[in-house]
Structure formats: C-alpha cells, structure tokens
Amino acid sequence: MRCAGSISEIFVPAKSKAVSSVQDCQIKGRVTDVKMSINLEHPEIGDVQVALTAPSGKSVVVHDYTGGTQNNLTTTYKKDILNEMIGQSTRGSWTLQVKDKSGQKRGNLKKWKLEFHYQDVDDLKKMEGIGPKIEQLLNNANIYSWSKLSVTNPSRIREILRAAG
C-alpha cells in the first residue's frame, strides 16, 4: 500500500532550519513493514539531515549529515532504519523534514515516496466486555483487529489478561 503521491519540487535553502513535505494517508491500520524512497539533489549531502515523522509525532532521522562532499541523495530506506515506525498508525500526515547546515549550498527535494505493509485496525471496544484497558492490552499483544482476535487462541487471551493483573 502506498500513501504517497508525487510532490512538487521543494527548494532546500542553505542553512535552513527545516523544510517539510507532507503526505497524507487515509488508510486505517498499523504499520508492519515500511520503506521510504527519496530523491534529493544537493551538491554535498554531508551538509544535510533528513527525518521522517509519523502522524503520532514519532520521528526517525534517516540521514544525519553523512556522505561528505558526495552529491545527491537518491536511495530507499527500509525497515532496518525505519524500525521505530513499526506499530505506528498509518492514518494521518507523514512528514519528511530536510535540514541544510551549510551556509552556501542549496538543494531540491525532487520527490519522496512512502510505502507500507499494514495490519487492519478495528475498535475492539465495540465488543461487550472489552473496554479501553483491555483493548490496550490486546493492542500491546499485537491484536488490533477482529480478524486477529478471532484466530487468537483463548489460552493466549487469558495469558494476556492475567499478565496485566
């Protein structure tokens, strides 16, 4: 599933605090796998920091002023770097921020793309007997949907509930 589209080219000024590009995702789910592709033109990528922020506010720096005088950043980041995004909600605004610490060099964010694999999310509190606390316990055990709950062994559910006291 892609929550991405093409963006207009964004100018990255020299010595910028941060330039942001936002992509909205309307799919309701929890991230189980993620990859992000970027095409950033810049004469020295060692002057650049790039971070991805989830709708929850969770942020991961994917490029941190490395690469020295190498030009342009065209790459795909995968789960190994974006691992902290696993479990995040897919729905909402995903923000890419680019900072340039140099005083003279400028760049252009040509495009970026975000792709997810995700698990459906349902409001488990709709079932009689499941309130906010039990729903949170189930979510912590990676049970977010009716379909996942229906195939969970009853002994596993008892174990989840007993562990919480």
Image: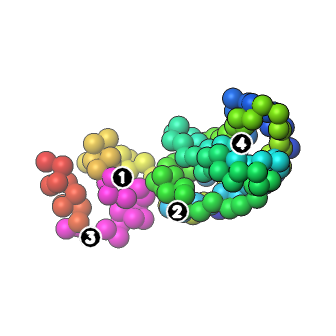
The amino acid marked with disc number 2 is Asp
**Distance from label 3 to label 1 (Cα)?**
15 Å
The residues colored magenta run: 138-155
The amino acid marked with disc number 3 is Asn
Q: Residue at x 55, y 46 (%)?
A: 60
Q: Is residue 49 left or right of residue 55?
A: right
Q: Is residue 87 left or right of residue 154?
A: right
Q: Which residue is mark 3?
A: 153
Please indicate, yes or no, whether residue 2 appears anywhere in the rendered image.
Answer: no
**Distance from label 4 to label 2 (Cα)?**
23 Å
Of marks 1 and 4, the one in the foreground: 4
Decide which of 33, 81 is in the foreground and name it. 81
First in residue order: circle 1 vs circle 2? 2
Of marks 1 and 2, the one in the foreground: 2
Q: Which residue is mark 1?
A: 139
Up-down: is 97 above or below 75?
above
Q: Is residue 101 left or right of residue 157?
A: right
Secondary element at image label 1? helix
**Distance from label 1 to label 4 (Cα)?**
40 Å
* Other residues around mark 1 within 10 Å, as few (<14) / some (14–19) / many (≥20): some
Decide which of 139, 64 is in the foreground and name it. 64
The amino acid marked with disc number 4 is Asp
x and y percent of residue 149 in the render? 35, 62
Asked if the magenta segment contains residue 149, the reply would be: yes
Which disc number belongs to residue 80?
2
The amino acid marked with disc number 1 is Asn
